[in-house]
Image: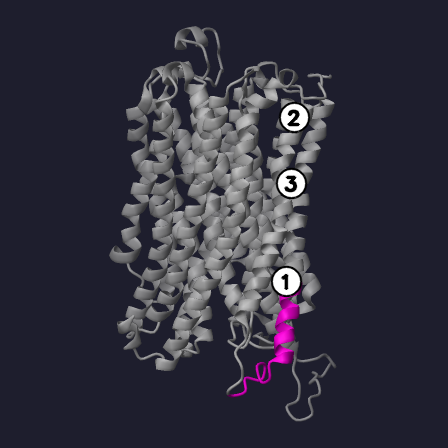
């Protein structure tokens, strides 16, 4: 900090303001998480207690040991998720201010290197802490349960109890993503509407009372929420793979290392990500603006390559060459005369390697496709920016069209991954593909968190009234972060889809539904397929309206302060400071109030379906939610990202519009000899009509890309993990036909 103060940018007063802003952001973030986690603790206690009784009904008899251990796993998973979110938030808050400070250093090469390293290392620390904590806690939990169950004969019961860990992590992630998403977008949209649109002052202007709340929101939503989300993905994917593996007599008999092989994939991923991270900070450090994006993308590529290289030896070490993915005792007996049976694995290490690699490279490709549709370096976003020439309406039309179109390639890639991995190793292969995609989790988190850190650093620089050169550096760092954040969003959606499918596979395997087949034309199955497809839209409607309600409250409060605090809007000397605490409270109260209904919808839907309509209805619900949810999540995230970067493209002066040339004196349009207006190419900047149209699109897109879109990831996963944990309870009700005793195979 002292070195930064000795730099050439800024003065003592600015640095004093910076420290105060840092303290305000930290206080606001702690206040929100304290309030949110207070609600989460109550939920964990109530739902965990209920689980003891619901999950205890196993094979038609009561086994409270199963219920108690599953509930304990749920509590551990929830608490671990909260700790992960808190760690991420505190790291981000500290790094925000530190990144601003390092951007003041001189010469410029030092400032670029140090500010980039601070932001990247902040994200990396969170990524490694989250991944390492998740693996460590899960492994100790499994080791604890080994003392209770006989692995050779009770492996299925053991890992079904462990699956509660994934449910706890995902449930807290739901609150973190939805609550944090509502908070950050309520503050962001409210600050933009009241500041840029109504008052006409710049973004992050210190006069705007909502700026601190906006910075707090970036930390609790984009950082803590993202951390909880991907922690949930990791926990759920691992639990799904363990449950499926436990169904195989051959894998159980092969030994402990084979059985917990999914944990080794994630552990190796952490080591590879840690080794590659030194490339960005030490071996190939950033020296100027042009190198930032290249370095971040290199990290992703090198991590994927590194994981690919080391995975085959890991597979060869821990997996047998031949095994049957079912309950029969020997491979030969199970696979006799069973041609084309994906459960009969004849080259286990190689097939597992292919499944993991498919997930690894599929995730990377999906990420770069997402970048193509959301970065202003490419034609799709530039088309959206150009559409602002005719106003906000055409901007909205172009953005929606882009979002719908952007689902094509990711859907195709996910389909290919599912088909290939299932063909090689049945549902176990799908779960390994999901873990493969999550193998680079630490690096993806580092890059994803990097963006909000740089964004907040720029806001702090403006609020502290540091020199313009500081803001220029942080904006450049943030611009690269926006590009790579799109890659992270694509990765998160793709991994959520595979994790959800893996959990559904584990549910299907556990309930043995496929033993007699599932007829999709069964009226009950088809009905719940439609209901499941509808749920993501209902959920998105609830979260988007919540953002709108909270943003309206924020706008009213900001306007009230402008009207009642003398000299605030005008920036008069000696005016009273804006009431940041009031704005923080509005976002906090609104997010806590509005996050409950969507969470209830997601968590009760599969439970009510299984209880009353049976397991086949649950499969229809999960399939519909997955198919609809993944498309809507991709579309929402990419639409919002395109509008955001279209606005930034206009602001940086990249858009030129042909406009009639006017006389400098009279202002009349100059015409040629044929009477047609003479056109000149005019650069569009902030304040232009194009920029105003772009701001409208960006404002509409904010809740899509940062609230509804990311939260849909959790909807897909949470419904599937709940179904898996409650599978035995559903099967205990009229042999899996529900209280309504719905007949199977009506057609």
The vertical placement of 723 against 631, above or below, is: above
- The disc at residue 551 is 1
Total marks drawn? 3
Query: x and y percent of residue 671 in the render?
Result: 70, 83
Mark 2 element type = helix
Residue at position x 33%, y 27% in the image: 315
Q: Is residue 688 visible?
A: no
Return the disc, 1 or 3, that comes first in the chain's sequence. Answer: 1
Image depth: mark 1 or mark 2 in front: 2
Q: Residues within 10 Å of mark 2 (few under 14, many from 20)?
A: many
Q: Residues within 10 Å of mark 3 (few under 14, many from 20)?
A: some
Return the disc, 1 or 2, that comes first in the chain's sequence. Answer: 1
Residue at position x 54%, y 77% in the image: 207
Residue 557 or 462: which is nearer the viewer? 557
Q: Which residue is mark 2?
A: 611
Query: x and y percent of residue 508 in the render?
Result: 55, 23
In 3D space, how far apart are the residues under numbered discs 1 and 3 (Cα atoms)?
Answer: 23 Å
The rendered magenta stretch, by its main secondary structure, is classed as helix
Residue 139 or 414: which is nearer the viewer? 139
Residue at position x 41%, y 47% in the image: 84
Range covered by the magenta-colored residues: 551-573
Residue at position x 31%, y 62% in the image: 286
The furthest residue to the bottom:
665
Mark 3 element type = helix
- The disc at residue 601 is 3
Residue 250 forms part of the magenta stretch = no
- Pick the quarter of the image with the C terminus: top right
**Left of 321 or right of it: where is 333?**
right
Mark 1 element type = helix
């Amino acid at each position: 900090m002292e070195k930064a103060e000795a730099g050439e940018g800024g003065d003592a007063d600015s640095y004093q303001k910076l420290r105060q802003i840092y303290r305000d952001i930290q206080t606001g973030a702690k206040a929100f998480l304290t309030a949110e986690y207070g609600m989460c603790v109550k939920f964990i206690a109530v739902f965990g207690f209920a689980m003891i009784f619901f999950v205890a009904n196993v094979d038609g008899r009561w086994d409270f040991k199963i219920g108690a251990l599953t509930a304990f796993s749920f509590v551990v998973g929830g608490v671990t998720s909260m700790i992960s979110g808190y760690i991420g938030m505190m790291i981000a808050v500290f790094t925000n201010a530190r990144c601003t400070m390092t951007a003041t250093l001189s010469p410029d090469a030092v400032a670029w290197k140090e500010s980039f390293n601070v932001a990247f290392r902040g994200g990396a620390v969170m990524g490694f802490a989250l991944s390492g904590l998740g693996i460590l806690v899960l492994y100790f939990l499994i080791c604890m349960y080994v003392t209770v169950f006989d692995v050779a004969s009770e492996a299925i019961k053991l890992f079904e109890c462990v699956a509660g860990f994934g449910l706890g992590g995902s449930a807290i992630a739901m609150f973190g993503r939805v609550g944090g998403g509502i908070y950050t977008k309520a503050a962001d949209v409210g600050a933009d509407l009241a500041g840029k649109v109504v008052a006409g002052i710049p973004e992050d202007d210190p006069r705007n009372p909502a700026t601190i709340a906006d910075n707090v929101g970036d930390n609790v939503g984009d950082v803590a929420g993202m951390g909880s989300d991907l922690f949930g993905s990791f926990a759920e994917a691992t639990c799904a793979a363990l449950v499926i593996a436990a169904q195989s007599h051959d894998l159980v008999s092969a030994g402990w290392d084979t059985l917990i092989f999914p944990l080794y994939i994630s552990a190796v991923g952490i080591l590879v990500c840690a080794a590659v991270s030194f490339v960005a900070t030490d071996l190939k450090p950033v020296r100027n603006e042009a190198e930032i994006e290249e370095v971040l993308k290199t990290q992703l590529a090198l991590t994927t390559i590194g994981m690919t290289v080391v995975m085959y030896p890991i597979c060869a070490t821990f997996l047998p060459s031949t095994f049957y993915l079912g309950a029969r005792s020997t491979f030969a007996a199970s696979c006799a005369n069973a041609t084309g049976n994906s459960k009969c694995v004849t080259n286990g290490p190689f097939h597992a390697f292919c499944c993991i690699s498919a997930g690894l490279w599929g995730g990377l490709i999906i990420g770069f496709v997402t970048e193509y549709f959301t970065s202003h370096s490419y034609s799709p976003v530039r088309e959206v920016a150009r559409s602002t020439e005719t106003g906000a309406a055409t901007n909205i039309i172009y953005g929606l069209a882009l979002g719908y179109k952007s689902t094509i390639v990711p859907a195709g890639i996910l389909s290919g991954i599912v088909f290939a991995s299932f063909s090689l190793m049945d549902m176990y292969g799908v779960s390994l593909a999901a873990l493969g995609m999550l193998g680079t989790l630490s690096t993806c988190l580092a890059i994803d968190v990097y963006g909000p850190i740089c964004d907040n650093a720029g806001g702090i620089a403006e609020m502290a009234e540091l020199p313009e050169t500081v803001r220029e550096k942080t904006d450049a760092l943030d611009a690269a972060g926006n590009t790579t954040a799109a890659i992270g969003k694509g990765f998160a959606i793709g991994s959520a889809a595979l994790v959800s499918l893996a959990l559904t596979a584990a549910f299907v395997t556990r309930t043995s539904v496929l033993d007699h087949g599932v007829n999709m034309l069964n009226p009950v199955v088809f009905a719940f397929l439609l209901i499941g497809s509808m749920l993501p839209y209902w959920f998105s409607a609830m979260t988007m309206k919540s953002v709108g309600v909270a943003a309206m409250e924020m706008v009213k409060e900001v306007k009230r302060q402008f009207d009642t605090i003398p000299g605030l809007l005008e920036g008069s000397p000696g005016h009273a400071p804006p009431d940041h605490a009031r704005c923080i409270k509005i976002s906090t109260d609104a997010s806590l109030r509005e996050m409950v209904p969507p969470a209830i919808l997601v968590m009760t839907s599969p439970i009510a379906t299984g209880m009353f309509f049976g397991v086949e209805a649950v499969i229809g619900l999960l399939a519909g939610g997955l198919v609809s949810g993944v498309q809507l999540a991709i579309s929402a995230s990419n639409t919002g990202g395109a509008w955001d970067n279209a606005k930034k493209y206009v602001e940086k002066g990249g858009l030129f519009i042909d406009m009639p040339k006017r006389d400098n004196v009279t202002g009349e349009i100059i015409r040629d000899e044929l009477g047609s207006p003479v056109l000149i190419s005019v650069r569009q900047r902030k304040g232009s009509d194009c920029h105003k149209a772009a701001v409208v699109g960006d404002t509409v897109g904010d809740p899509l890309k940062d609230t509804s879109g990311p939260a849909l990831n959790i909807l897909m996963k949470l419904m599937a993990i709940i179904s898996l944990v409650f599978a035995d309870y559903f099967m205990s009700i009229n042999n899996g036909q529900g209280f309504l005793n719905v007949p199977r195979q009506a057609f």
